[in-house]
Image (cartoon, rainbow, N blue to C red):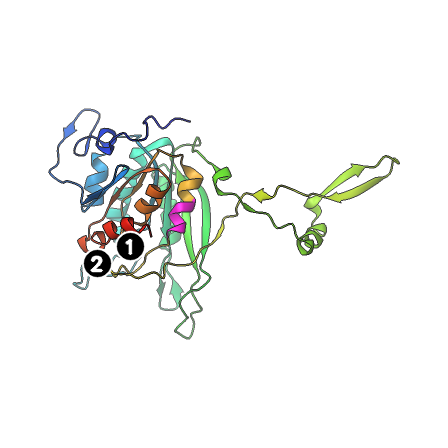
Amino acid sequence: MSHGYALGTPIAEILGEPILVRPSTVRRVTLRPFFATDLGELWVADCLTTLRGLPSNSVDLVITSPPYDGQPKYGNGESYDREWYRGFFLDVTAEVHRVLKPSGSFVLNYRSRRQGNERGLIQYELIFWLRDQGFLFCEDFVWGKPSPPPGRFKKVLKDAVEYCFQFAKTPEWQFFPEHCLTPARWDAKDRERRKKLAHNHVRVNAPSGQGRNRVQAGPDMVRPSTLLHLEADFTPNPGRHPARFPLTLPTFFINLLTLPGQMVVDPFGGVGTSGLAAEKLGRRWLITELDPNYASVVPARFESGR
């Protein structure tokens, strides 16, 4: 499958100079990247404005984690509420749908917060809202954190789960599980467990004419599951970002859903984790982040590689 650009092609050639071309309109903007490599660019800019500058059908993967509900906005008492998701965020996802290639995917990492005695419902409402926009709901991945923060209140346990919802523009979305194979469990204990599972038996005809059951063996490397055991990011946090995801999270989805040289976009780029993962995997990338404090730590992350 070709991505249409050879490695080494300047990103400005792909995304236009300085941002892009719409089908009937040339838009010039005065912004310049805050940080750039041969493969990608970080823009300190409003993500909706930037997405509106991208050409339709030009992006292979959008992966992002927007601000969670209840998170403070500007330090002035405002917070991201349901209306922000129903308004601004759906404007963003409408542009995501437009810029995705027919083979592209959109991975959304989101988890509603608890409101008193009840868990918020926005995480589920988003699925229906995005389907109404024309997205296909392909898969829901559960991100399980081995070392979650402790539960601090009477009716709250350790919150060890977040969701990664995969959406696509068309049924032709690309998929490369061979990039994400994991070692199979074929030890003696596991074989005994599998003998008890009916779907793991195959009827075999022996030379004597008698039949017997044989437990299926299988390859040494197998497809991963939709349960992702990934430790949260406990590295130093000079940007003081409140909700960083680990480098292993975008790495998994970039491997699963793109090929080298293809384009990855993160509209809510934070401290640049998606861009760094894409860079390490030889993918082109574009991330936007509105807060210059978060963006300021990205060059040092790329220099250190973590």
Q: Which of marks 1 and 2 is nearer the N terminus?
A: 1
Give residue 259's quadrant in the image.
top left
Residue 157 position, x and y percent, is: 44, 69
**Residue 67's mark?**
1
Residue shown at 27% from the left, 57% from the top: 81
Local crowd at mark 1 within 10 Å, few (<14), some, or many (≥20)? Answer: many
Of residue 162 and residue 33, the one placed in the foreground of this image is 33
C-alpha distance separating marks 1 and 2? 9 Å
- 248 inside magenta stretch: yes
Give residue 171's quadrant in the image.
top left
Q: Which amino acid does label 2 sit on?
A: Lys
Q: Is residue 294 above or below residue 132?
A: below
**Residue 73's mark?**
2
SS majority, magenta: helix
Q: Is residue 95 left or right of residue 188?
A: left
Q: Is residue 59 above or below residue 64?
A: above
Q: In which quarter of the image is the N terminus?
A: top left
Residue contact between numbered discs 1 and 2, judged by CB atoms under 8 Å:
yes
- 56 inside magenta stretch: no
Q: What residue type is labelled 1?
A: Pro
Residue shown at 18% from the left, 62% from the top: 75
Residue 100 position, x and y percent, is: 33, 34
**Magenta residues (range):** 247-252
Residue 4 position, x and y percent, is: 33, 25
Which residue sits furthest right? 208
